[in-house]
Amino acid sequence: MNTKIKRKTIKWIILGIVLLILISISTILYINSYYIYILGEYFGVNCEKIEINKVYPEDIVQFTLDELSSNDKIEFNQSMMLINTDFPLKNDFVPVISQYKDTDVKMNNCMHDAYTSLSVAVTENTGEKIFISSDYRTDSQQQEEYNENPSSATKPGASEHQSGLALDIYSPYYAGFSFIKTEAGQFVNSNCWKYGFIIRYPSFGKNETGIKYEPWHIRYVGEPHSKIIYNNHLTLEDYILYYENDVWYEIDGYLISRQTLSSNNTLKIPKDYSEVVISPDNTGYYIVTVLKNK
Ligand SMILES: [Zn+2]
């Protein structure tokens, strides 16, 4: 064979290989279209960045915890707890949980209504239903879980399930990672923030959370936090630790601040507000979320 023909043959072989690779990739993506969905979430294609501005509101008033908790417009809950191996639950932590509707499921009191809204929205938008495979766990149940799967389960104290704020959900026949293959799974992953939930271990967050992507594990944080976390493409670690002590931030019609309790047991809130939610964050601070008066 002369060199000219040789070169031509090699060219055709290379072209053939490239074509074969392209066809294989397209076939894989066509059959497993959820890969494209995961890629989109990884890069945050549906996110619309929300501005976070430091502000210096006038008329900030100090109140004791007793005064705050006797006020009807102020809700105390546990929604903003950061729970991980760096910030495990304290030994004296008591989750505020109760039975969800007339089921055996136990979840944190602050999220009952939000979960109902989410599950109704899933069915309305996808025609599919979601179910709960894992809800609140006691310390000893988490220990059992850890003994069975030491590589994937967290040690007792470091699991969000012990706060009742997290749920593992599935759609029939699609539990665990397969959940993301379903319309319901993709709807939950892209839209649960509208109902106060976040995907606690997102595909892009392993460096911060220490846990690989769990599209089935939803965590309640409440609004507007879920909206900010999803749209600014953050993990809960990034988000809570971002707030400087005793600074006020204005975000999407809310005033938010992360405060330490003063020596005489007081926290600060603005004089004028529509609603306030106060939650400990399990890192030594309280997160105060104020819906401004319109
Ligand atoms: Zn879970």
Image (cartoon, helix red, strand yellow):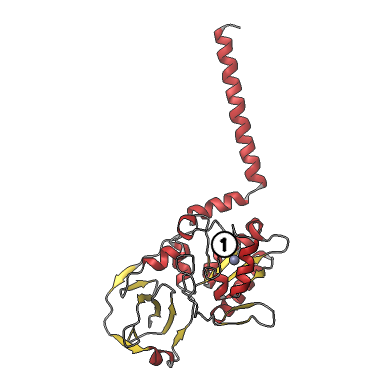
Query: Looking at this rendering, what residue extends furthest in the right direction?
Result: 173
Instruction: Identify residue for label 1.
Output: 189
Label 1 sits on a secondary structure element that is: helix
- In the rendered image, the quadrant that contains the N terminus is top right
- In the rendered image, the quadrant that contains the C terminus is bottom left
Q: Is residue 15 left or right of residue 65?
A: right
How far across and down, in percent of the image, does residue 292 sit?
38, 80
Residue drawn at (36%, 75%) of the image: 258
In this rendering, the count of numbered labels is 1
Residue nearest the observer in this picture, 132 or 227? 132
Inspect this view and state whether residue 137 appears. no
How far across and down, in percent of the image, does residue 110 sit?
53, 80
How far across and down, in percent of the image, does residue 147 sit?
63, 63
How far across and down, in percent of the image, does residue 252 sit?
40, 71
Residue drawn at (58%, 65%) of the image: 217
Residue nearest the observer in this picture, 249 or 201? 201
Compared with 277, 161 (above or below) is above
Residue drawn at (66%, 82%) of the image: 101
Give residue 133's quadrant in the image: bottom right
Q: Is residue 131 left or right of residue 61?
A: right
Inspect this view and state whether residue 27 appears. yes
Locate ligand 1 by image quadrant.
Answer: bottom right
Q: Amino acid at mark 1?
A: Asn
Residue drawn at (38%, 92%) of the image: 67
Compared with 22, 79 (above or below) is below
Label 1, residues with CA under 10 Å away: few <14, some 14-19, many ≥20? many
